[in-house]
Amino acid sequence: MNFNLKLILPSVILAVFALSGLHAEEKSNAPVSKREVQAKLEYCKTCHGVQAQGFRGAYPMPRLAGQQPEYIENQLKAFIERRRSNPVMFNVAHVLSPAMLAALTHEFQTLDPKPLGGAPKDLAAKGKKIYEEGVAGTDIPPCASCHGPQAKGDGQFPRLAGQLHDYVTRKLTNWEKERGQDRAHPDTSAIMQPIAHDLKPDQIAAVAAYISTLD
Ligand code: HEC
Ligand code: HEC
């Protein structure tokens, strides 16, 4: 028997190195299985609705269906880093691994349920005008210029179509208390801040009613 150890050993060592290299990569961003992603998704839907269409209760749960992946990822990171304050979502988000976080964001984009509705109908016309033209005589620009003519969003600009009107009303009313809470690390919430600040309560109610009807 003539095992050529000199030839075999280096390849064994190389193989071990290759494996340990792979392992290090997995650790930094451990992959998640389809089953794990599905199980987590079901958990998200217990609050956000069976089709992620949102849920209208005492505390409105936002619609995530059709939402932009980049926006969802930004918000989950903001909850984790407490730049966006919400005790419920901090607890939910801070246990998500980077791989799970990335996998989840893409799942929601594929869902397309009908809007939940329920907003006062008489406000929608006034809301449409604000959405498409902004508010004359103020610095409030057309919402459409960033959120898109159909309110479908784009990247860091969230989809607003079909979002629950009571959720939108709360978010626009409380913007400065909830978002951009780490002054040393300003984030994308700063783009919306002056707009949320300048909108009057009746204008918020109108534009929230309008976008909640959009498919
Ligand atoms: C126990 C209920 C609950 C569960 C479970 C839950 N959420 Fe939430 N989520 C909320 C609430 C309440 C809000 C609204 C927070 C606010 O008002 O700012 C929210 C907000 C969000 C937002 C921000 C939406 C927006 O339009 O800005 C994202 C993104 C989100 N959740 C993702 C998830 C994901 C992903 C999961 C599953 C891993 C999940 N949530 C599970 C209750 C929950
Ligand atoms: C200059 C661009 C721009 C304009 C114009 C704009 N937005 Fe935004 N909006 C943003 C960005 C960026 C975000 C995401 C903020 C973040 O990451 O926290 C946002 C977020 C929002 C959110 C939060 C969505 C959620 O799911 O929580 C609402 C509601 C909103 N905008 C409504 C409006 C309305 C209503 C108008 C018009 C009166 C408007 N926006 C005009 C850029 C804009």
Image (tube, rainbow, N blue to C red):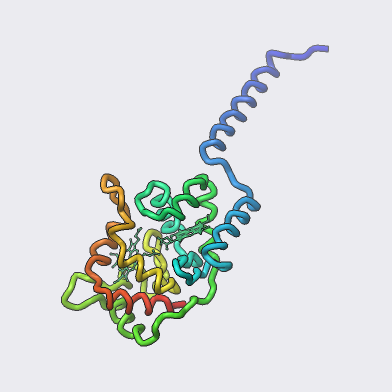
For the residue pair 43 and 143, the one nearer the viewer reads as 43
Give the position of the N terminus as an image quadrant: top right
Q: Residue at x 39, y 85 (%)?
A: 121
Q: In the picture provided, is 83 more to the left or to the right than 32?
A: left
Q: Position of residue 84 (x, y in %)?
A: 36, 54
Q: Residue at x 40, y 69 (%)?
A: 167
Q: Position of residue 213 (x, y in %)?
A: 43, 79
For the residue pair 147 and 77, the one nearer the viewer reads as 77
Residue farthest toward the front in the current orientation of the protein: 58
Instruction: Tell me if residue 114 comes above or below residue 8 in the rendering.
Output: below
- The image quarter in which residue 194 lies: bottom left
Instruction: Tell me if residue 122 comes above or below residue 79 in the rendering.
Output: below
- The image quarter in which residue 132 lies: bottom left
Q: Residue at x 55, y 32 (%)?
A: 24
Q: In the picture provided, is 199 more to the left or to the right than 57?
A: left
For the residue pair 159 and 89, the one nearer the viewer reads as 89
Q: Position of residue 95 (x, y in %)?
A: 51, 46
Q: In the picture provided, is 59 more to the left or to the right than 169?
A: right
Residue farthest toward the right in the current orientation of the protein: 1
Instruction: Tell me if residue 12 comes above or below residue 64 in the rendering.
Output: above
